[in-house]
Image (cartoon, grey):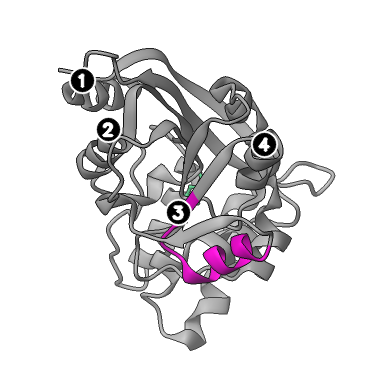
Amino acid sequence: MSSSSAQHWDPAQYAENARFVSDLGMPVVELLSPKPGERILDLGCGDGALTLKLAKLGCKVVGVDSSPEMVAAAKSLGLNAQVMDGHTLPFINEFDAVFSNAALHWMKHPKDVIAGVWRALKPGGRFVGEFGGCGNVAAIVTAIESALSSRGVTVANPWFFPRPEEYRGLLEAMGFAIEIMALIPRPTPLPGDVGGWLETFAQPYTSALPGTEKRGFISEVVETLRPMLCDANGNWHADYVRLRFSATKPQAAP
Ligand code: BEZ
């Protein structure tokens, strides 16, 4: 799912701490409106949970992801999945749609990604997806960066969370026609405390620390976030803001 070398994906840990990612991806599948027989590229397919839904709807799906572990998990579901960097997609004019859920924020060079999606699509093909937009996990990032700073450590934000106008501009510059571009605040219930989220997703930050400091660091960030992200009943949520979009490569592409 990630293009960051500091992030490693463990399918079992992902299933425990992040199953909500694919569970909450169904509205994006509905926006895609896949038809049986369509050839679809799932960009950043992860462990293949949504790729499988598309396959069960009768689509011919190819899943790609930069994590060999996640691709192995997707393959174990019987899916066609390949290890690939989303910045260098090699497909030419072969998909009716490119779908992406909760993956594009890991790809820090969006122009390269969009150019590859454009090449991969047939004329008239759709690019439909959702990922972290401007303001996504802002409280979490602030708490992480402040705890790192107090240890004298600085790490550049590993994620791409654009404003809607910025992403619209990038897609339009490639030639896409935009149907939907919406920033959607979506506080997202977590299966445990935010420590599980940090363990699963924040490795680009935590890997900058010596292994012996990681546990204390995560506990400190959890306590900083408790007043903001944990309710009186002990239920945690992450301060997610999604950027949802639907775009089309025109029939007569420029
Ligand atoms: C997200 O889905 O918004 C997200 C996941 C991991 C890290 C950052 C953001």
Q: Tell which circle, 3 or 4, labels the residue nearer the N-terminal end.
A: 4
Q: Tell which circle, 2 or 1, labels the residue nearer the N-terminal end.
A: 2
Residue 128 on image: x %, y % = 46, 27
Compute the Cα span from label 4 to label 1: 29 Å
Q: Is residue 226 above or below residue 77?
A: above
Residue highlighted by disc 2: 118
Residue highlighted by disc 1: 175
Residue 166 in view (yes/no): yes
Give the residue type that dot 2 points to: Trp
Extent of the magenta region: 63-76
Whether the magenta-drawn stretch holds residue 220 is answered as: no
Residue highlighted by disc 4: 24
Residue highlighted by disc 3: 64
Secondary structure of residue under mark 3: strand
Q: What residue is rendered at 39% in x and 66% in y?
A: 204
Name the residue furthest bottom.
Answer: 212
Residue 210 on image: x %, y % = 41, 85
Viewer-nearest of labels 4 and 1?
1
Q: Is 18 on the left or on the right of 158, as rendered?
A: right
